[in-house]
C-alpha cells in the first residue's frame, strides 16, 4: 500500500512531536541547577568530592609526562614541535577544566544561597571622619 504525501507529512509531524517530548524529558532529568535546588546537600558533597579528585589526580601532568616519554626518541624539529603542541594542549585542557569546575561550584553556591558577599579590604575602605 503506497503512502500519500499527506500520510508521510503526518507521520513526520508525529515523530517530531514524540522526539520533542523525549527531549523535554531528558532536559528535565539533566537540569543540574534544578537538581541542586532540589538536593543542595548532596550537590555540595558531589562538588567537593569532584574538586578533590580533580585537584589530586594530576592527570594533566601524567599525560604530559607520558607524551614526552613517548616522543623522547624524536630528535628532529617535528618531535620538538609535537612536544610543544601537546604541552600547550594539555595546559589548555587543564585550564578549561579548572575553569569549568570553578563555574559549577559558583553555580551551586548561588543555587543554594551560599554565595559569600565580597569583603572590603582595609586599603579600599574610606577613612572615617571623626
Image (cartoon, helix red, strand yellow):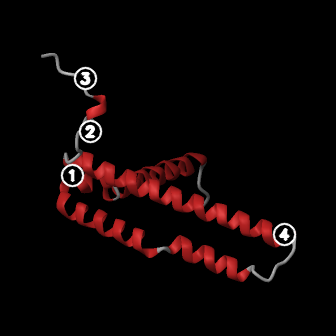
Determine which quarter of the picture holds residue 28: bottom left
Question: Whole-Å distance between the Cαs marked 2 and 3?
Answer: 16 Å
Asked whether residue 92 is in view, the answer is yes
Question: Whole-Å distance between the Cαs marked 2 and 4?
Answer: 49 Å
Q: Which residue is mark 2?
A: 118
Say which label, 1 or 4, has the lower sequence index. Answer: 1
Q: Which residue is mark 4?
A: 78
Question: Whole-Å distance between the Cαs marked 1 and 4?
Answer: 51 Å
Say which label, 1 or 2, has the lower sequence index. Answer: 1
Say which label, 3 or 4, has the lower sequence index. Answer: 4
x then y, percent, for residue 4: 59, 50
Q: Which residue is mark 1?
A: 37
x then y, percent, for residue 121: 27, 36
Categorize mark 1 by other alpha carbons within 10 Å: few (<14), some (14-19), many (20+). Answer: some
Q: Which residue is mark 3?
A: 126
Say which label, 2 or 3, has the lower sequence index. Answer: 2
Question: Whole-Å distance between the Cαs marked 3 and 4?
Answer: 58 Å
Given contact means CB atoms under 8 Å apart, are the residues at marks 1 and 2 in contact? no
Q: Is residue 66 above or below residue 10?
A: below
Closest to the camera, between mark 1 and mark 4, is: 4
Closest to the camera, between mark 2 and mark 4, is: 2
The residue depicted at 36 percent of the width and 54 percent of the height is: 104
The secondary structure type at the circle numbered 3 is loop
Amino acid at each position: 500500500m503506497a503512502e500519500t504525501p499527506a500520510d508521510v507529512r503526518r507521520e513526520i509531524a508525529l515523530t517530531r512531536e514524540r522526539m520533542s517530548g523525549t527531549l523535554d524529558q531528558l532536559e528535565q532529568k539533566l537540569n543540574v541547577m534544578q537538581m541542586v535546588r532540589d538536593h543542595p546537600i548532596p550537590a555540595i558533597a558531589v562538588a567537593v568530592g569532584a574538586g578533590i579528585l580533580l585537584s589530586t589526580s594530576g592527570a594533566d601532568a601524567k599525560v604530559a609526562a607520558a607524551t614526552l616519554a613517548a616522543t623522547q626518541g624524536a630528535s628532529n624539529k617535528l618531535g620538538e614541535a609535537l612536544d610543544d603542541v601537546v604541552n600547550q594542549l594539555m595546559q589548555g585542557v587543564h585550564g578549561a577544566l579548572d575553569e569549568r569546575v570553578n563555574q559549577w561550584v559558583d553555580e551551586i553556591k548561588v543555587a543554594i544561597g551560599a554565595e559569600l558577599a565580597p569583603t572590603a579590604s582595609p586599603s579600599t575602605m574610606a577613612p572615617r571622619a571623626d
